Image (cartoon, rainbow, N blue to C red):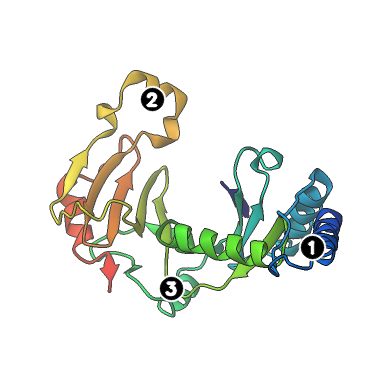
Amino acid sequence: MKYPIKAAVVATGIAMLFGTANMTEAATVNNSAQAVTAKAPAVADQKAVEAAKKELSQKLQQKNTGDMYLLYVSDKNLNGGSEFLYYLDMLHFTNYENYLNQATKLQGPVLQKPEGLPEGYKFVKGNIQPPIAKNRAEYQKEVKAEAEAQGKGVYYKKFDWKEIGEINLTFANGKDNLQMQVSHKIDKDKSSGEYRYYTSDDYDAETAKKHPEWVRNVLSWSDEDHVYNITTNPGSPLTKEDLIKFAETAVKK
């Protein structure tokens, strides 16, 4: 599944070409002028943006590659108000062993089936995502710098990644399910190894109506770099104590 998250055809650069020509002519007329080198501002146009987006979408047709691209558009008005747009084909799994084999090749904490999970719970699906949240500023700075250096108003780059950014796993037993997640912590100033728990009844009525998929029983905790969650559906027979027990063996570091 592809995820464009808030790309190769580039503008012909006619404006830059004429800008350079004009500067050269001025220097020739004024022999006493100091030599100056400069590039005209990069220009983006809607056709180039759409062409890049189309090409990126085609690149992601091959499923389950883990490929990640970052598109830069100098004129944010041509890109929904943002200079950047991520294109991602995250790694998906329906087999637990395949997931575990891939996850252990990457850097970072690996979620695993917790000990003591009641009989009947089976692995349903999982995904691994790149470390966008952690490296967002670095990725964007790099792409923008390369685009400006090449005088391109529309530019994209593929990033290879070897570190886990986020993992999501789902185990189910009939109508009941248990979900697990680990993701990079954004706020590094707060670190807590203490468990926090709230139930599906703790959600306000408005949230429950607009986003019923959010309404779950949640156990969360964190370390210096990551946030962890184990959640269950409303009405699940698993208790807070059960989730705390699962948390003790849910993470392989």
| Left or right of residue 4, residue 241 in this image | left
Mark 3 highlights which residue? 103
Label 1, label 2: how far apart the Cα atoms are: 68 Å
Quadrant in which the C terminus appears: bottom left
Amino acid type at image mark 3: Ala
Q: Which residue is mark 1?
A: 30
Residue density around tag 1, few if under 14, some if 14–19, many if 20 or more, within 10 Å? few
- Image point 28% across, 55% down: which residue? 227
Front residue of 139 and 193 = 139
Location of residue 188 in the rendering, given as x and y in whole percent from the top left corner:
25, 56
Q: Which residue is mark 2?
A: 207
Could you tell whether 63 is left or right of 207 in the image? Answer: right
Is 235 situated above or below 58? above
Q: Earlier in the sequence, mark 1 or mark 2?
A: 1
Give SS at disc 3.
Answer: helix
Specify the amino acid type for callout 2.
Answer: Thr
